[in-house]
Image (cartoon, rainbow, N blue to C red):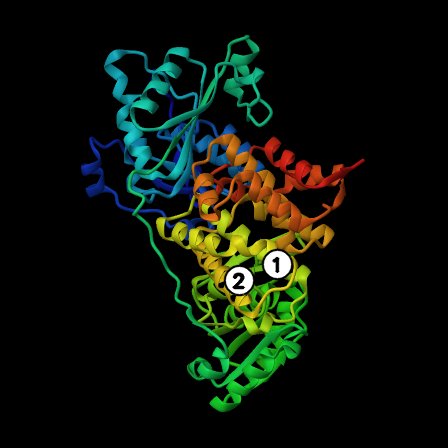
Amino acid sequence: MRMRRKRNLEPRMDACAALLVARGKPIKNLKEAALTYRALVDYGDLFGNGNPVELEVGCGNGGFIAQLAVRRPDTNFIAVEVCTNVVLTAMERIKAENIPNVRFLNVPAEILPCYIPAYSVARIYLNFSTPLPEAGREKQRLTSDRFLAIYKMLLTDGGTIEQKTDSAPFFDYSLRKYRENGFTVRDVTRDLHNSAYAQENIVTEYEANFSSKGMPIYRAVAQYHQENPMKFTYFMPTKIICGRDCVAEQGNLMKDLGKSALIVTGRSSAKNGALGDVLSALETNGQTATVYDRVTPNPTVACVREGVALLKSAGADFVVAIGGGSPMDAAKAIATLAVQDRTDEEIFAGGYAPVALPMAHVPTTAGTGSEVTPYSILTNDAKRTKTSITSPAMFPRLAYLDGKYMRDLPAATTVNTALDAFSHAVEGMLSRNATPLSDALARESLRILYPLLPKTSGTLTLEERDTLLYASALAGMTIAQSGTTAVHGMGYSLTYFYNIDHGRANGLLLGATLRLCEKKGVPALQEILSACGDTLDGVCATIDTLLGEREAIPAERLEEFAAAVSEKHIKKSKYEPTAEEVRVIFFTSLRPQK
């Protein structure tokens, strides 16, 4: 029976135009579609951020996608529905509920590659797709060879399809087709509502109707790894100058950055000699300098605002960062906000233009790797956590690596920063955004860094300090490509609420996370252990020794931290922990108190 056209359809569609990416008509094949439509979505323009993207094919009236988008505000969703009458209902729901992270495609699924960029979708949802049991309609099933080929064009490496259905024959057909098309099938249940997956399940009206009648719901996840691992990009525009007295000997390279520098640092740079070396080099170049040395650990928006104001009053046109992660993070934000004015509410909204004042960084700890990354991590008081902002322009132009500035670094700082670098290399390999080149950098970092970890709590030679700094830079170059994973996302709460050093927070959570990787059979774990030259038990024991006694935290706070972990970090992880697994990591890694 043909569905009756909704009253005032076109005016109502126009009222939802801001949510609608495109409308299209059925096309015979992709070749014809490519000639008719070619409007690939720019996710940054569409959503105004760089969050991961997931797709629901056949969204119906929008009940599922509305609940999912509210549950996971750090993920962007595109809902696909070919029926205009139906998609209108879904769009009006999203508009009425003011849900910002959902957009719609009113097109047939056959032409999705004309709109969705290749290898860009982290997950595809197929909820109660029409089974079409007739033999002659197999090609129209959303899990047929034809559609699976399309999904493989869209999924990221390691991306997944999550399917729910009330049809046992269609479910069995889908499982068979997934395996025939190179997918790995996992998390299969033939009675979803009485399974371990029920707690996180979003129940739609359609689903509730069937369940209320005692009918089982079938659910499975199919994961696909792209066949061409060599398809990747690599961008790292920072020039690295490494070696003893490199600031004094090659400080002339800063001459091209500008006429007047704002030096962003903490109090210790004057004591370790770094500030003096930089000021001397700038003086030799004929450049002026203003020192901003009020950066505190975990820099805030207020700290950055103060730095921007000083930069403008001094007439500075480039930035030099001296210190650990906090001065370098603050410097990047200052260099960016000096030319891109934003309100406090807009700072963490993403979508930065690739413009910033030029920078040179001089790290004085071996851990953050910020001298070779495009990230600035700031305290986000509105969300009560730490949040990353990023732009390609946040890569420093120059990075000077000289271990002599770490000669008198306290043992606790050396341990925590080394754990941070170790976590970067490990997480880089556990990230779904890892590439062959980022993995090569991570393996080399681990090969160099891991044997030095036990020594960081004692006395290190200057040469060993140099080696740590080099390994930290390699780990930074790794995450500049791959990003970090759920370990960092979990650690931010420990730092924000309990002032636990960032590197130590990562170290506290890393052992339990590696154990989870072993349980889930994540292939990258063996590569990590091989690079370290140790067993999983050995790596965990090394971390435990460096950490000493773990912090005691009330159990109710750990529950809150587990619930607050960013979905973006979880979805980027090859081990993709469930809500319960995140909770177990927290409770295993700390000492819960009643």
Residue 93 visible within the image: no
Q: Nearer the viewer, residue 20 or 405?
A: 405
The label shown at residue 550 is none
Q: Furthest-top residue in view? A: 214
- Secondary structure beneath disc 1? helix
Name the residue type under label 1: Thr
Q: Quadrant of the C terminus?
A: top right
Residue density around tag 1, few if under 14, some if 14–19, many if 20 or more, within 10 Å: many
Q: Quadrant of the N terminus?
A: top left
Q: Position of residue 568 (x, y in %)?
A: 52, 44
Asked whether disc 1 touches disc 2, contact meaning CB atoms under 8 Å apart, the reply is yes
Q: Measured along the vertical axis of the image, is residue 16 above or below residue 360? A: above
The image quarter containing residue 591 is: top right
Q: Nearer the viewer, residue 177 or 590?
A: 590
The label shown at residue 456 is 1
Q: Position of residue 592 (x, y in %)?
A: 75, 38
Determine the CA span between mark 1 and mark 2.
Answer: 9 Å
Q: Measured along the vertical axis of the image, is residue 182 above or below residue 135? A: below
Query: What's the residue at 44%, 44% (across, down)?
Result: 530
The residue beneath circle 2 is 468
- Secondary structure beneath disc 2? helix
Name the residue type under label 2: Leu
Q: Nearer the viewer, residue 92 or 134?
A: 134
Query: What's the residue at 37%, 60% (across, down)?
Result: 235
* Label whose residue precedes the other's in the sequence (1 or 2): 1
